[in-house]
Image (tube, rainbow, N blue to C red):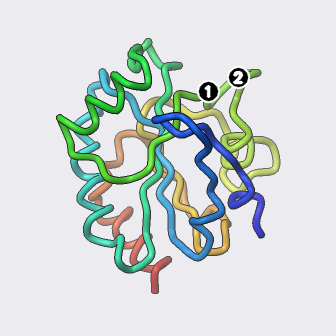
Amino acid sequence: MSAFHQVKLQALQGGELSLAPLKGQVVLVVNVASKCGLTPQYAALEQLQQRYRAQGFSVLGLPCNQFAGQEPGSEQDIQTFCDTQYGVSFPLSAKLEVNGPQRHALYRLLAGEGAEFPGDISWNFEKFLVGKDGRVLARFSPRTAPDDPTVVQAIEKALA
C-alpha cells in the first residue's frame, strides 16, 4: 500500500478517516476554508464529486485555519456550513495544519521535502491530484478553479 493510503486523519464528525479505502481511486486533495474569497469553489468541488464518483474519483476536503483565520469555526460549524451551503458529499477531515512545524503527515507527504511537488501551501483551496496508486500527479494553485479545463483533463487522464 502506498504511503498516501496509509495516512489516517481525524474525520470532521469525529473518529478516524482512513485513506486506505481510497486505494484504486483518483483523489483531489484540497485544503478548504468557509470564510475565504475562494470558498465558492466548494460548489465546483461537489460537482466534480458527483460527475466522477462512479468512475472511482473522490474529493478529499481538509479544513485549515492557517490562512488569515478563514476557518475559525468548530468541526460542527464546518459540517453545518458544508451541508447547508454546498451540499458537500465528499469526505472532510477535522481541521489540520498544512504548513509549519505542526504540518500534518499528509501534507509532509504531499508538499514536504522529497515530495513530487514540494513547497509550502500558499493559500486555501490549493489542490493535489493523487492517482489510483497513491502517487501525486499534479498540483494546482488556489486560484485554479476545480472545474478549470486543466484540472478536469488531469482527472479524466488519471481515471482512464
Decide: marks 2, 1 in contact (CB < 8 A)? yes
In percent of the image, x 66 and y 74: which residue is there?
133
Residue at 46% over, 87% down: 160
- Is 36 displayed left or right of 84 in the figure? right
Q: Amino acid at mark 2?
A: Gly
Quarter holding the N terminus is bottom right
Query: Which is more toward the observer, 80 or 120?
Result: 80
- Left or right of 82 in this view: 30: right
The disc at residue 160 is: none
Query: How many C-alpha atoms fall within 10 Å of the one at disc 2: few (<14), some, or many (≥20)?
Result: few
Label 1 belongs to which residue? 97
Q: Amino acid at mark 1?
A: Glu
Up the image or down, 1 lies above or below 125; here it is below
Q: Residue furthest front?
A: 15
Q: Which mark is residue 100?
A: 2
Q: Position of residue 48 (x, y in %)?
A: 30, 62
